[in-house]
Image (tube, grey):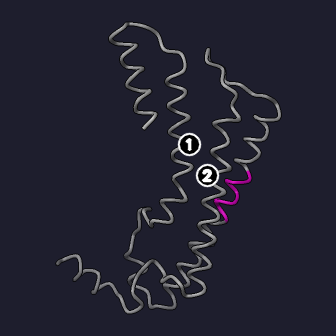
Amino acid sequence: MASIIVTCQMIFIRFVLNGSTIWQTEGVTYMMIAATMLGLPYVQFMRGHVNVDLLPLMLPVRARKALALLVLALTLAVTGVMLWHGYHFWYEAWDWGETSNSPWNPKLWVPYLALPLGFGLYALQLAADLLATTSGIERPFGFDPGAGLTDALAERAD
């Protein structure tokens, strides 16, 4: 919401007052990246990511569970790599006192903090999902154990 307000303020200054803007474009970019990074764990928790259900629905129950565990483990591994590199990216900016090359010149560790924080929370959510799927608390891909491709096609036709 803040990025929308800042964008509207920037448009007003540029096109109505015919003035120049200094920090708005960069600030909105940082806010959108932070919203994306911090939204990752919430979207995972709500199962809001885009899914292609064809393969899981074609598989038997045991293979479906194995695929779900494999996907969660690989996603957790990639997220761990991103967390590691995001942390180093943030730490270097903080340690060296890096600032932006713009007239606004903000300290870059502040917006870069969204990277390790977002990927760290996302990794925790993925680990919780992996534990829930492994222990049987959650069904693989959220499907009923007996659900198959014909059930899903019939459900979508209704």
- Identity of the amino acid at label 1? Ala
- Is 83 included in the stretch rendered in magenta? yes
Span highlighted in magenta in the image: 77-84
In the picture as drawn, the residue positioned furthest to the right comes out as: 95
Residue 143 vs residue 68: left or right? left
In the picture as drawn, the residue positioned furthest to the top comes out as: 18
**What is the C-alpha distance between the residues marked 2 and 1?**
8 Å
- Identity of the amino acid at label 2? Gly
The answer to which quarter of the image holds residue 41 is: bottom right
**Residues at badges 2 and 1 in contact (C-beta under 8 Å)?**
yes
13 or 141, which lies in front?
Answer: 13
- The residue at the point 73 percent across, 41 percent down is 90
SS for callout 2: helix
Q: Which residue is mark 1?
A: 34
- The residue at the point 54 percent across, 26 percent down is 26
Overall secondary structure of the magenta section: helix
1 or 148, which lies in front?
Answer: 1
- Closer to the N terminus: mark 2 or mark 1? 1
Q: Which mark is residue 118?
A: 2
Residue 52 lies, with reference to residue 69, above or below; the image says: above
Q: Which mark is residue 155?
A: none
> x and y percent of residue 127 in the render?
64, 71
